Image: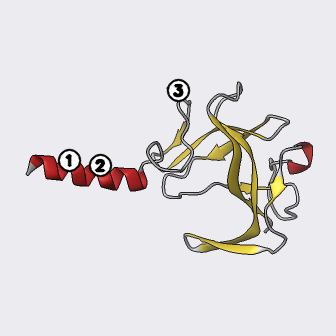
């Protein structure tokens, strides 16, 4: 019975664990210094694009996707990601998309670029899909 339970767990893990499936997985042991605001919000560094632009972002533990204020957003508060400085930035669609985020709606574009959690570009992905906020 224990063997059947292990087998079931392994089948489930293969569906959700990126190291066993088709999703990319970063293979590294690293520590990232995060800011902690009242055990409610965690902020930390992110390096984006071919220009290796450093941003401080909210590491949202309740979301499965990355949303970034972009340089083409007229109402976003600085700092924003300057996609025009990156030769590897790609806007994946020409149609504006609306994403529901908690009780808010964000409009923008599905985009991709290199995203790293360290300045040396060892902990991240070269072609990562994220949501670029327009408004």
Of callouts 3 and 1, the N-terminal one: 1
Q: Position of residue 100 (x, y in %)?
A: 61, 73
In the displayed structure, 36 sits above or below 10; it is above
Residues at discs 3 and 2 in contact (Cβ within 8 Å): no
Residue shown at 83% from the left, 64% from the top: 75
> Who is closer to the viewer here, 133 or 127?
127
- Which residue is labeled 2 in the image? 10
Q: Are marks 2 and 1 in contact (CB under 8 Å)?
A: yes
Q: Secondary structure at mark 2?
A: helix
Q: Nearer the viewer, residue 39 or 58?
A: 58
Q: Position of residue 4 (x, y in %)?
A: 15, 52
Residue at image mark 3: 30
Determine the CA span between mark 3 and mark 2: 26 Å
Q: CA distance from mark 2 to mark 1?
A: 6 Å
Compared with 122, 132 (above or below) is below
- SS of the residue at dot 1? helix
């Amino acid at each position: 019975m224990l063997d059947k339970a292990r087998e079931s767990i392994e089948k489930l893990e293969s569906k959700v664990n990126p190291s066993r499936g088709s999703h990319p997985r970063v293979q590294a042991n690293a520590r990232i210094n995060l800011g902690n605001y009242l055990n409610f919000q965690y902020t930390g560094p992110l390096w984006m694009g071919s220009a290796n632009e450093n941003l401080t972002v909210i590491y949202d533990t309740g979301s499965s996707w990355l949303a970034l204020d972009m340089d083409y957003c007229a109402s976003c508060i600085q700092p924003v990601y300057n996609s025009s400085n990156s030769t590897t930035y790609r806007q994946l669609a020409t149609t504006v998309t609306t994403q529901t985020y908690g009780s808010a709606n964000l409009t923008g574009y599905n985009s991709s670029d290199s995203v790293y959690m360290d300045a040396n570009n060892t902990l991240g992905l070269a072609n990562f899909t994220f949501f670029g906020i327009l408004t």
